[in-house]
Image (tube, rainbow, N blue to C red):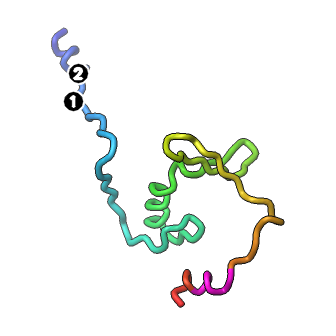
Amino acid sequence: MALALVACQPVATVPKPARGGTAVEALVGQPTVLSPLFETNDSTRDVDSLIYQGLTSVDAQQSITSTYSEYGTPVSVSAPAASDTVEAPDAVYRIFNGG
């Protein structure tokens, strides 16, 4: 009977991580751009999932929603209507393209 009880004991316990601190992620390969829109390899996808996890979700209608907290108060974000958007000036594109 003693042998059966010993066998049921956990071999090791994993402590619950403390809030904050540093997370270490091992990757095979090197991530390229850190944008989920331009993922080209698994390493980039892994890093992006850590960065953007919880920032966006997909609702029941398969629409992407974004929710974040501003000073502890949840704030819901939605895309503007197409009529409320404008094309960015060429200078903005040059900045992001390294020119």
Dots 2, 1 in contact, CB < 8 A:
yes
Please state if 21 lies on the left or on the right of 88 as rendered: left
| Quadrant (top left, top right, bottom left, bottom right) of the C terminus | bottom right
Q: Nearer the viewer, residue 68 or 29?
A: 68
**x and y percentages locating residue 17 in the rendered image:** 30, 39
**Residue type, numbered disc 1:** Val
Magenta region: 89-94
Label 1 crowd (10 A; few <14 / some 14-19 / many >=20): few
User: Residue 24: x, y in percent?
Assistant: 30, 55
Amino acid type, mark 2: Gln
Residue placed furthest toward the left = 2
Instruction: Report how far apart the C-alphas of labels 2 and 1 lie in the structure.
Output: 6 Å
The numbered disc on residue 66 is none
Residue under the image location 21 percent in, 14 percent down: 5
Query: Looking at the image, which residue sits at the far right?
Result: 83
Residue 9 numbered mark, or none:
2
Assess whether residue 93 is covered by the magenta stretch: yes
Structural crowding at the residue carrying mark 2, measured as other residues with C-alpha within 10 Å and reported as few (<14), some (14–19) or many (≥20): few
Q: How many numbered discs sit on the rendered protein?
A: 2
> Residue 11's mark?
1
Q: Residue furthest top?
A: 1
At horizontal 61% and vertical 45% (from top left) the residue drawn is 75
Relative to 40, 85 lies left or right: right
In the displayed structure image, the side of residue 81 where residue 17 appears, left or right: left
Q: Quadrant of residue 31?
A: bottom left
Quick check: 86 above or below 94? above
Residue at horizontal 51 percent and vertical 51 percent from the top: 53
Q: What SS does tag 1 mark?
A: loop
Residue 84 locus on image (x, y percent): 79, 65
Any magenta on residue 92?
A: yes
